Amino acid sequence: MIDPAQNLRRIIWLASYPKSGNTWMRSLLAHYFMPPGQAPDINNLRRFTTADVRQDFFDAAAGRPFASKSVAEWLQVRGRAVRLIAASKPGTHFVKTHCQAVQYMGHHLIPPEVTAGAIYMMRNPFDLAPSFARHQSADIDTAIERMMNPETMMGTDTGIRDAMGRWDDHVRTWTAAPGLPRHVVRYEDLLDKPARTMRRLLEFLSVKPDAAKLARAIKATTFEAMKKQEERLGFQERPAGMSAFFAKGQAGVWREDLTPAQVARIREAFLPALKEWYPELLEETAEFAAAG
């Protein structure tokens, strides 16, 4: 039982739309904070952090093996499961989520009473679309439709859901949530300047950056290193039907993967968010779209 008076504001959310670098960030933090040689491989990241879709926490919250097709029941049990996750460690700890930071059917998906802060991972939607398509075992046009749909959800076989919605709404709910201590990391900046980007993140966490530890963590979690881990060990979080979770891991792949019409659709759907977060892509994507 959890004491109702207990302060459970212990979760630092590692939040993102799927395929935006969440696994990379969890690995980076694990390699930085855990002793040398003890950081987990990609299949054991739960030794360092956890996720809000953990079946065992939902089972404990439901008092039985949780399985439901009802969104309402998932929401009801989710609140209790998230409190159990918060209480599972004595201090602040990281929890992965793909949910929006909103109230959904009267329930806070990210309850303030368990939240200490958030790290929000963001990836430009042009590169996200082909990666999300592979993740969903869908074609790119279908993936773009799902990124534009405010009701988009993913879920486990037992009915534990990720309520993601539209890409731009996801970004807005996390980056503008009132009263939420947050730090935003763009995937592209982490690729381009990993050390500087991580130093800023550590400072947000009130951790004085250690240059040697940071260099080791960055070297251990390059895209190629994680891709080789998946090839050698497999990846338990890879969705069924997806051939490889770590496929390209680059910025700018949209130039080869998308058609002008697809670029135009993404620009039109998400233009206000692009102006705020990716102004450097506006001119090039406009020219690319017009070339069609």
Image (spheres, rainbow, N blue to C red):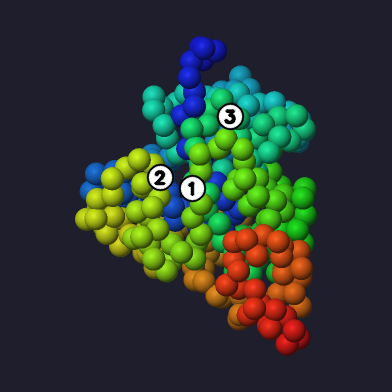
Label 3 with label 1: CB-CB less than 8 Å: no
Of the residues shown, which amino acid type is indicated by label 2? Phe
SS class, disc 3: helix
Relative height, residue 116 to residue 143 (above, below): above
**Direction from residue 217 to residue 272 in the image, left or right:** right
For the residue carrying disc 2, how many other residues have a C-alpha within 10 Å: few (<14), some (14-19), or many (20+)? Answer: some
The C terminus is located in which quarter? bottom right
Relative height, residue 148 to residue 175 (above, below): below
The residues bearing labels 3 and 1 have C-alpha atoms spaced at a distance of: 17 Å
- Please state the horizontal and vertical placement of residue 199, each as a whole percent of the image: 34, 54
Which residue is the site of mark 3?
A: 112
Report the residue at 77% width, 32% height from top: 105
**Direction from residue 121 to residue 260 in the image, left or right:** right
SS class, disc 2: helix
Which residue is the site of mark 2?
A: 204
SS class, disc 1: strand
**Direction from residue 215 to residue 231 in the image, left or right:** right
The residues bearing labels 2 and 1 have C-alpha atoms spaced at a distance of: 7 Å
Precedes in sequence: disc 2 or disc 1: 1
Of the residues shown, which amino acid type is indicated by label 1? His
Which residue is the site of mark 1?
A: 183
